[in-house]
């Protein structure tokens, strides 16, 4: 049996990491694994701000004992027993950079170390650099590539549309006969022009 924790960014839907963690693992072990998985800075102070189901702060755990115990002394099982349902984990206390960690219950999967079992979006650093996930865009800004293709299809206008011609409209026999006669006349005129034409090389005297 393992515990399931979801890591998210406040106000953003485009990022998530879901971990399976042994109850015996400590907050410090969890911290080290998150730091490695999400490339958090290694030279910063960290803090777990623990909260109950109503959102009240019930404890604070850091690298050093802040009054509730140090992170390497507190097991995940103890936090669950104490009624802690979520944390704000500051991976960079100085710059107030954090993620939200939410307890989602027990699962059957066995793990030896904290392990990511679900993942969505890039690492938090990308969001700091201005990355915006599709689902975090306002409704009027969300466009898929297929939407652009559909829009282009709508804008395309065929020659038939420009000439106001119905391509399915059938010409009657009389119209077809007229067109054939015009084509024959054009061909006869072309033949006459070819037969009656003379070629001059410039040495002959032209009769006017």
Image (tube, rainbow, N blue to C red):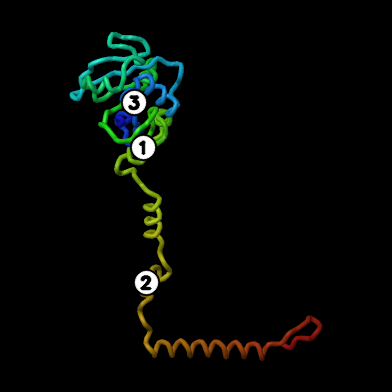
Q: Mark 2 packing: few (<14 Cα in 10 Å), some, or many (20+)?
A: few
Dividing the picture into quadrants, the one containing residue 120 is: top left
Dividing the picture into quadrants, the one containing residue 149 is: bottom left
- Write the residue at 37% across / 57% down: 150
Is residue 4 at least partly visible in the picture?
no
Q: Sequence-wise, which precedes: disc 2 or disc 3?
A: 3
* Label 1 element class: strand
**Residue 112 coordinates in the image, percent (x, y):** 39, 28
- Residue that mark 1 sits on: 118
* Label 3 element class: strand
Between tags 2 and 3, which lies in front?
Answer: 3
Q: CA distance from mark 2 to mark 1?
A: 56 Å
- Residue that mark 2 sits on: 164
Between tags 1 and 3, which lies in front?
Answer: 1
26 lies above or below 17: above
Question: Left or right: where does residue 193 sit relative to residue 177?
Answer: right
Q: Which mark is residue 99?
A: 3
Q: Nearer the viewer, residue 40 or 37?
A: 37
């Amino acid at each position: 049996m393992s515990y399931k924790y979801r890591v998210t960014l406040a106000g953003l839907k485009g990022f998530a990491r879901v971990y399976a963690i042994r109850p015996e693992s400590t907050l410090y072990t969890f911290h080290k694994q998150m730091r490695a998985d999400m490339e958090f800075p290694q030279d910063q102070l960290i803090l777990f701000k623990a909260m109950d189901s109503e959102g009240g702060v019930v404890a604070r755990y850091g690298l050093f004992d802040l009054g509730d115990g140090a992170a390497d002394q507190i097991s995940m099982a103890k936090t669950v027993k104490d009624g802690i349902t979520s944390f704000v984990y500051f991976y960079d206390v100085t710059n107030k950079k954090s993620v939200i960690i939410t307890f989602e219950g027990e699962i059957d999967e066995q793990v030896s170390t904290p392990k990511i079992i679900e993942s969505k979006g890039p690492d938090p650093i990308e969001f700091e650099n201005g990355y915006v996930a599709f689902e975090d865009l306002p409704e009027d800004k969300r466009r898929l590539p297929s939407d652009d293709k559909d829009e282009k299809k709508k804008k395309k206008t065929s020659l038939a549309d420009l000439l106001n011609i119905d391509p399915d409209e059938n010409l009657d026999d009389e119209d077809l006969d007229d067109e054939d006669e015009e084509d024959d006349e054009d061909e006869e005129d072309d033949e006459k022009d070819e037969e009656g034409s003379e070629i001059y090389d410039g040495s002959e005297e032209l009769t006017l």
